[in-house]
Structures are given as structure tokens and as C-alpha cells.
Image (cartoon, rainbow, N blue to C red):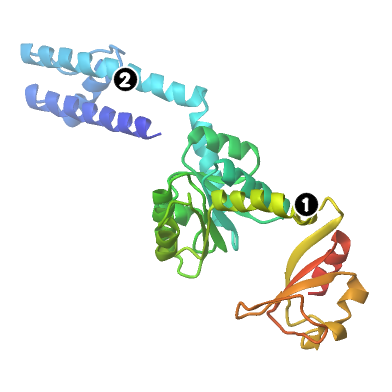
Amino acid sequence: MKKILFSLGLLIAILMIGTFGYMWIEDSSFLDGLYMTMITITTVGYSEVVHLSPAGKLFTMVIIFLGVGFVLYLVSKITETVVEGGLQRILGRITMEKKVAKLKDHYIVCGYGRIGKEICKSLKENNRTFVVVERDRQEVKRIDNKGYFVLEGEASDDEVLLQAGIKQAKGLIAVVSSDADNVYIVLSARGLNPDLFIMARSSGVEGTETKLLRAGANKVVSPYFIGAIRMAQLVVRPTVVDFVDLTVQGELGLRLEELSVSARASFVNKTLMGSDLRQRFDVIVVAIKSQLGEMLFNPSPHTEIREGDTLVVLGKHDNIKALEVEL
């Protein structure tokens, strides 16, 4: 599109040069000069409305040399754009930007590499709305084919983040391959939305986590560190790791979920024993996180449930679904 607009600009420039050239050399009117230029560069060859002097003939030859070839080039570019789907891509991008502009409380995933793909897959499975920002045009096509919201561009660009709806977003996940790029993304995102939850990927290089946190990230995750810990745990505690994996993935028919307690919940300000959660929904409350961020593991039956608390529960899918309705 930029090439076409640039070419159109040059075409207008050639038309103006030809028009004013005829006005200066042959003392023609603006309309006659424009007419002469048009029939010259388009090779139409209608009758001349301006009598050409030797200087005018030389000027006409220059216009033919410059203009005819350029018009053919412009036509080929427009044809190429339409034939190869460039126009369709432009219209599709405009449509996508309009859809993204309507989103609210969504997540922005910056980068669609190996980690970004898994994050998007998990967000999709858990019915979370998200937008992918990716600079690779071919990758953007593949993301669009999956039905995800996607924008092409640099995730550290303020304009791209604004198009992704960062003002209305719930969180941003920076997982591009470079630590420096992730730092720039976090800095840009924090400047545009001070209240945004930001999670960033770290390569594990010493000092990277500190820089990302200083830039404004709420959480920093190193896939290499997590992978190393997991491998060690598989050696030391293989049964525990297998149980957690099966629980999280739902292969045991169980689900480990976090649920926020709202004011309308019937068991607000009641103890765990008084809430009858185990009897009514057949779920286990593994932990309770307060609004202040304090985490209480394996809470006692006398622990009081308050509005704004987050319950970490373990149970069957249907039972947790029923509890979500209650909350």
C-alpha cells in the first residue's frame, strides 16, 4: 500500500511538472497543459491543443520518456496488489483493527514464538479473550487462520499497543525472543497503562529479571529456570509431578481452579465449615488468597471467607462450574 501511495504521489508530480512546463514553454493555459501531459504519458495520442515549438517538442520527448514508463509501472503494481491479495489483506487488517477496538478486559500477547503459541492455546482453551501482536507477516497469516485476533507490527511501538486496546486490556504478556525487546515492550506498556498487569519472559541471563521488574513488569518468568526445576522434580518427586500435571490438564476428571468471592456469594463472612462447600459442591479448598495478597495454604475449617478472597479449589469440572455460578 505504501508503494502504491508513493507511486501515485510521483504520478501527480509528473502531471504537475508537465502542466507547468507547457504553461512556461508554450504559454498554454493550465487545462491545456494538463491535457497535453495526460495524452502524452498515457500514449492516447489525441490531437494536440498546443502548437509545439522546438523547445516544446524536446520537453514532450522528456515527458514521454519519464511518464510512459512510470504509468506502466504504476499499473503493474496496482494489478499485482489486487491479484496477489494485497487489497484483501489491507481490508482484512482494517476489519481486524475495528474488531480489536471493541475488546475490553482482554490480554495482549506480544510475540508468537514457541512460548507464545502455547500461551495462546491455553488462553483459548480457558475462554480468555486475547490479541496477538506479531511482526512477521507470514506468521500473522497463520495466526489469522487460527481465528485469533492479531495485529501486525512491533509490540514496543506505542501506536501498535494502542491499536491492541492496551487502555482497556486486563494484562499484557511479553514473550518475544530478545530480552532487550521485552524490556522495551514493558516500558511502553507501563507508560500507556499504569494499572496494567504485565508478565514478561526472561532468558535467565543475570540481571535481566531485575531490569524487567524495574521497567514495570509485575511478574517475570524464565522458561529455562522452570524447565530445570521441573526436570529435577521429576527425578525427586515423580508421583507428585504426575498428579499435578494430570490435575491441571484435566486427565483425571479433576480441575484445579481459582475463583474470586463476590459480595453475592451465600457464604461470605462464613467459615469454611459453615459454608458447606465440601458437602454442597464436593470440592476441596486447597488455599485462600486474601485481597492483600496473603496466601493461606490448607486453611482450617474455622477460616473465614471474605469478599474479594480468591479460593484455590480442586474438584470435578461440573462441580466447580456449579460453584462458579454461586460466586
* SS at mark 1 in the image: helix
- Front residue of 312 and 107: 312
Residue 98 in sight in this render: no
Q: CA distance from mark 2 to mark 1?
A: 68 Å
Q: Is residue 10 left or right of residue 248?
A: left
- Residue at the disc numbered 2: 71
Nearer the camera: disc 2 or disc 1: 1
Q: Is residue 272 left or right of residue 1?
A: right
Q: Position of residue 144 (x, y in %)?
A: 60, 39
Q: Amino acid at mark 1?
A: Asp
Number of numbered markers:
2
Q: Residues within 10 Å of mark 1 (few under 14, many from 20)?
A: few
Q: Residue furthest front?
A: 236
- Image position, residue 9 (x, y; %): 28, 33
Q: In the rendered structure, which amino acid carries the disc numbered 2?
A: Val
Image coordinates of residue 222 in percent, x first then y, are 53, 53
Structural crowding at the residue carrying mark 2, measured as other residues with C-alpha within 10 Å and reported as few (<14), some (14–19) or many (≥20): some
Q: Nearer the viewer, residue 285 or 317?
A: 285
Specify the label residue 79 is tagged with. none
Give the image location of residue 202, x and y in percent. Answer: 48, 53
Q: Is residue 275 left or right of residue 203?
A: right
The disc, 2 or 1, on the residue closer to the chain's N-terminal end is: 2
In the image, is residue 228 above or below residue 75? below
Residue nearer the viewer, 304 or 82: 304
Please give the residue where the numbered disc 1 appears in the rendered image. 242
**Which residue lies at the image location 86% right of the left edge and 86% below the top edge?**
274
Q: Pick the quarter of the image with the N terminus.
A: top left
Extreme right residue here? 279
Q: Secondary structure at mark 2?
A: helix
